[in-house]
Every structure is written in C-alpha cells, then in structure tokens.
Image: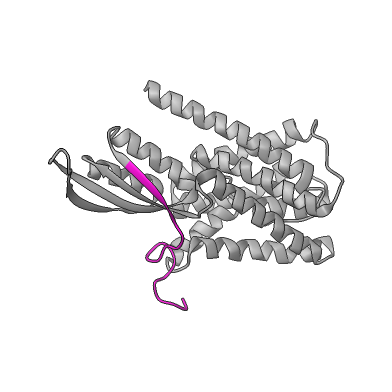
C-alpha cells in the first residue's frame, strides 16, 4: 500500500511538472506563432483565433467527445487517467501559466521550435506518469484498433494532417501548416527522447518466474500481448520463463512498473524497435 501511494505521488508530481512545462510551451511560443500543430490543442488554437476563449478550457471541451470514444472503444482506465491529465493540464495552462508567463514575440520559426521542445518535454513527463493528454492520441488508437493493419504512427499522422490542412484556411496562409509541421516534428522527437531513446516502439525481453501474472497485466493495462517462452537459467539451472513484448513509447514506464510489481526479481531488457510488423502495428504485407 505504501509503495502504491508513493508511486501515485510520483505520477502526480510528473503530471504537475509536465503540465507546467506543456502550458509554458503552448502559451509563450505556440499560441503567438499562430499555428495549429495537430491534436485537440491545435483545434483549440484555431477556435481561439476567432473566439478569443481560454485555450485550456477549449482543449478540455474538445476532449470530452474524444474521452467518450476512449471509454467505449479503448478502456475505462485509459479514459479516466486521460480525463485527469487533460483537466490538470488545462487548468494549469489557463489559471497558472497564462496570467503570469510572458509571451515570446520574436521569430515565428523560433516560436515553433522552442514551443515544440517545451510541449514535447511536458507531454513526455505526463506519459512517464502513466497518463495521456488525449486529443489525437485517442483518435489514433481508435483508428488503429478498428484497423489493426494500420500503424499507430500512420493513424496519428492522418488525424494531425487534417488539422494542419484546416489551419491554412483559419490563419489565412500556408505557412501556418508548414510551421505547424515543424512544431509537430519537434514535439514528437522530444516526446520520444524523454520516454525512451527517440524510438516510437520499445521491444522488451523479461526473464521472470511469474510470466502469467505479468502477461495478464500487460494485456489488461496496456492492451498489448506477449509471448511466453520456457527457459532454464544457465547459472542456477532452474526453470524460468522469458516474456517477449513490444509496446508504444508512452507505455514503457507502465510496463516497467508492471514487471516490478509482478516480480521484483525479474530481469528486464529493453531495445529500440526501428520497425514493428504484425497485428496491432504495421501490416506485414507490403502496400497495406
């Protein structure tokens, strides 16, 4: 119980720090650049361009139907944690960052780059806390679940691409989409770097004597699967098992905790996966 409370406290701290950095990047750099770098925040920035309403509040409102999708098509746990993260990050942006944080008025390119770096760092910390900021993440995961042959990266790119195209007409210039693409690229790279080594997927090899308990939690909590292989310890000569699984970048910290909780004496090895082919990721057959 004490360990659980300590972990939840750590997750809450990561959420608060991540939301603060995320809010500074959005308010000080992304908003003055007049871009919409995909996601719910991109839609909120476009609405703000006309209505001049608080961006955090708009983001929260836009996320409500997306959270409903997550509740019915993904998992209730994911929907609840995402709702908490979205509420906290929106509150921090509107009531803590916006009233006191100055706005950068320099080069638009620098706004995009520094905004992407800060937003990516904030999102990365939130992901490390086992939560998500919602937005296109939800739509991407729903699309990928409905069409398992579609990679999650391709699904997210499709949704964000629509937002970028619409931003051209909202802001009245094609530069909005081009600069938005730069910002989105910077954000993605920083998120990947914060979570795990710059790669979108992580291949994990787990040596454990409790493979079934760990595999059940991987299936239940991460919506991933695993392969169990019987093995023998070379030094001890005792029977053991090896679990093989691949997870998204935002799921690695959760996987680490699942392994630690299930078997504190387990051995976890993680490696970068430059490409993942198969059910739930990218289709093995070329051209699909």
Query: Is residue 185 visible from the viewing direction of this image?
Result: yes
Residue at coordinates 54% horizontally, 54% vertically from top-left?
Answer: 138
**Closer to us: 171 or 286:** 286
Q: Is residue 130 above or below residue 108?
A: above
**Closer to us: 131 or 228:** 228
The spot of residue 108 in percent (x, y) is: 82, 53
* Farthest bottom residue in view: 287
Residue at coordinates 62% horizontally, 40% vertically from top-left?
Answer: 122
* Farthest front residue in view: 235
- Left or right: residue 278 versus residue 83 is left
Magenta stretch encompasses residue 286: yes
Magenta stretch encompasses residue 158: no
- Left or right: residue 119 versus residue 200 is right
The spot of residue 8 in percent (x, y) is: 47, 29
Q: In the rendered image, which quarter is residue 23 located in? A: top right
Residue range in magenta is: 268-288
**Closer to us: 14 or 169:** 14
Majority secondary structure of the magenta segment?
loop
């Amino acid at each position: 119980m004490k360990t659980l409370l300590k972990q939840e406290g750590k997750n809450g701290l990561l959420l608060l720090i991540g939301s603060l950095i995320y809010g500074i990047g959005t308010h000080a750099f992304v908003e003055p650049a007049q871009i919409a770098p995909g996601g719910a925040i991109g839609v909120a920035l476009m609405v703000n361009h006309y209505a001049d309403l608080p961006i955090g509040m708009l983001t929260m409102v836009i996320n409500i139907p997306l959270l409903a999708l997550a509740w019915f098509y993904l998992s209730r746990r994911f929907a609840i944690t995402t709702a908490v993260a979205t509420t906290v990050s929106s509150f921090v942006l509107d009531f803590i960052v916006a009233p006191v944080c100055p706005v950068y008025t320099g080069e638009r390119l620098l706004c995009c780059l520094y905004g992407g770096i800060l937003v990516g760092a904030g999102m990365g910390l939130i992901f490390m806390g086992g939560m998500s900021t919602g937005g296109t993440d939800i739509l991407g995961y729903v699309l990928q679940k409905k069409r398992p042959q579609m990679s999650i990266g391709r699904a997210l790119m499709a949704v964000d691409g629509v937002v970028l195209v619409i931003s051209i007409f909202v802001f009245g210039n094609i530069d909005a989409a081009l600069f938005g693409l730069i910002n989105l690229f910077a954000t993605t790279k920083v998120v990947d770097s914060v979570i795990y080594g710059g790669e979108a997927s992580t291949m994990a090899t787990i040596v454990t004597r409790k493979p079934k308990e760990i595999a059940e939690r991987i299936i239940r909590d991460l919506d991933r699967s695993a392969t169990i292989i019987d093995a023998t310890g070379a030094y001890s000569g005792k029977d053991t098992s090896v679990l093989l699984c691949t997870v998204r970048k935002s799921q690695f910290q959760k996987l680490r905790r699942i392994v630690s909780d299930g078997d504190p004496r387990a051995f976890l090895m993680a490696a970068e996966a430059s490409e993942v082919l198969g059910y739930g990721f990218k289709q093995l057959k070329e051209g699909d």
